[in-house]
């Protein structure tokens, strides 16, 4: 029976995608795990692997086609012995959206690799995943069997197969929880731990695109050109609108003297020169923010409707500018890592972000965010919160300023930091205590080494 390949859901918020490029052509033979296409989502452009094997009978969607609904057929594979006469019947089969609701498949993993990262600072599937368990992506469905075993064949996602090999799990003994019994990664992990697989939540629906202002018309006498929004920019527009309209922001600002920090940084970098490692001011800020969250755990929280989630680990999302927007790779458990380790990790994450090699696990999650514009000469600014995180720290430039010490005028290197806070999750006193802890750590950086 022909195999229908459908538009997969590659992120928890994805409802539509753009078929950026086919990596196969009609007549090509493909095997499970072969990369067949690049699909642009609301967060990334991903290489998509085939789940089944066969010969490409027909490509139903042209390269560059935008807004293809998840579940829409995009190609048909012919199995061994089948000819083109089976294509018309397969192409006429109803799309997923036409099936009864009870037959809608749950969402599971499909093999993919991120090839060009397009995750904006506030589009945090990372955030959504901190409130609920990570939501995997939907499969490329197989027409006729829905993923169930047939003639002894085991149907499993490529990720599940790789994981089973790593963990030494026999897939034949694993009961699949995916659509029509397909085995997914959670089933393999559950089998390895000897427990039942957890229920898998459905993906959160994507918010509608932000419309142009009512009655908007461009100036009639000013030349202009239209620049089509990338998926990243669309998500930035949507998520920023959501954050500023739904999250009650308030702001706390503090000045921090960093002369001692700069001196310690110079000494450490001198010792690390032979290793080719350089600790930045931002690395100190990441470390200090993580330790401040440990001291003030009430600030390491997210608002989750009828409850607040208080995290026992500080995973710091760091805004990194890339072409067309910005992304927020995460330094996991930054409160347990030293400055050198944070510096190495950030160097790698920034390089991956700017060369389009970030993986989902590099940017998903995060309990607190930092946005630093000091390198651009920005003295002070207010950042927009990344929902559902409870706060984000905006860091300005360090500059020489006059200060008063012991009733005498002096000169110090001062950096202004502003904390944007979700008032549903944190009160002013909690935010103030966090900034006090941050200030103490940055003004006496040796305490970070204790």
Image (cartoon, helix red, strand yellow):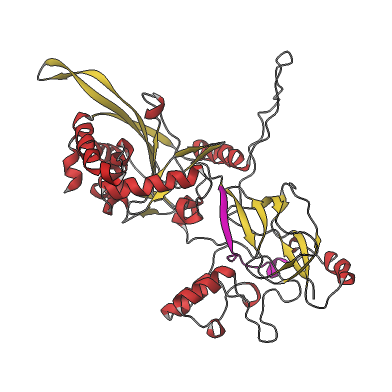
Report the residue at 23% width, 48% height from top: 295
* Residue projecting furthest to the right: 85
Q: In this view, does 126 lie to the left or right of 87?
A: left
Report the residue at 47% width, 61% height from top: 133
On screen, residue 204 above or below 378: below
Q: Tell me if residue 118 is in the magenta stretch.
A: no
Q: Which of 73 and 128 is in front in this view?
A: 73
Q: Nearer the viewer, residue 67 or 249?
A: 67
On screen, residue 33 above or below 346: below
Q: In this view, does 404 lie to the left or right of 170?
A: left
Residue 378 x %, y %: 39, 24
Q: Which of 109 and 253 is in front in this view?
A: 109
Q: Quadrant of residue 103?
A: bottom right
Q: Quadrant of residue 439?
A: top left
Residue 237 x %, y %: 58, 37
Q: In which quarter of the image is residue 213?
A: top right
Q: What stretch is highlighted in magenta?
A: 100-116
Instruction: Report the quarter where the N terminus lies.
Output: bottom right
Residue 12 x %, y %: 57, 56
* Residue projecting furthest to the front: 274
Residue 121 x %, y %: 49, 41
Residue 398 visible to the viewer: yes
Q: Is residue 44 left or right of residue 447?
A: right
Report the residue at 12% width, 15% height from top: 408
């Amino acid at each position: 029976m022909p195999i229908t390949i459908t538009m997969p859901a590659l992120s928890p918020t994805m409802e539509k995608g753009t078929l950026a490029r086919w990596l196969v052509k009609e007549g090509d033979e493909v095997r499970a795990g072969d990369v067949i296409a690049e699909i642009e989502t609301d967060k990334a452009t991903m290489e998509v692997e085939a789940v089944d094997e066969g010969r490409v009978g027909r490509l139903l969607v042209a390269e560059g086609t935008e807004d293809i609904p998840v579940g829409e057929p995009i190609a048909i594979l012919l199995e061994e012995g089948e000819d083109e006469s089976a294509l018309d019947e397969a192409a006429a089969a109803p799309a997923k959206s036409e099936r009864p609701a009870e037959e809608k498949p749950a969402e599971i993993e499909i093999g993919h690799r991120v090839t060009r990262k397009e995750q904006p600072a506030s589009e945090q599937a990372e955030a959504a995943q901190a409130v609920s368990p990570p939501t995997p992506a939907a499969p490329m469905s197989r027409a006729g069997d829905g993923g169930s075993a047939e003639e002894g064949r085991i149907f499993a996602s490529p990720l599940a197969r790789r994981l089973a090999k790593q963990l030494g799990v026999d897939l034949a003994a694993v009961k699949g929880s995916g659509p029509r019994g397909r085995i997914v990664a959670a089933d393999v992990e559950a089998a390895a731990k000897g427990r039942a697989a957890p229920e898998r939540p459905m993906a959160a629906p994507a918010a509608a695109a932000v419309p142009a202002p009512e009655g908007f018309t461009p100036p009639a006498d000013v030349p202009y050109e239209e620049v089509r929004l990338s998926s990243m920019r669309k998500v930035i527009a949507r998520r920023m609108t959501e954050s500023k309209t739904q999250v009650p922001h308030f702001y706390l600002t503090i000045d921090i003297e960093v002369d001692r920090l700069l001196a310690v940084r110079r000494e450490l970098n001198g010792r690390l020169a032979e290793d080719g490692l350089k600790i930045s001011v931002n690395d100190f800020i990441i470390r200090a923010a993580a330790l401040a969250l440990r001291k003030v755990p009430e600030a390491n929280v997210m608002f989750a409707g009828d409850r607040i989630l208080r995290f026992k680990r500080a995973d710091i999302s760091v805004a990194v500018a890339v072409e067309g927007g910005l992304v927020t790779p995460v330094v996991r458990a930054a409160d347990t890592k030293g400055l050198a380790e944070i510096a190495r990790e950030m160097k790698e994450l920034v390089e991956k972000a700017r060369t389009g090699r970030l993986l989902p696990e590099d940017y998903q999650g995060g309990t607190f965010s930092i946005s630093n514009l000091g390198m651009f000469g920005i003295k002070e600014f207010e950042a927009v919160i990344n929902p559902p995180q409870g706060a984000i720290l905006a860091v300005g430039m360090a500059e020489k300023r006059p200060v008063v010490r012991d009733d005498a005028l002096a000169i110090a290197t001062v950096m202004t930091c502003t904390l944007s806070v979700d008032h549903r999750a944190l009160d002013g006193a909690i935010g103030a205590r966090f900034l006090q802890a941050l200030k103490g750590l940055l003004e006496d950086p040796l305490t970070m080494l204790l």
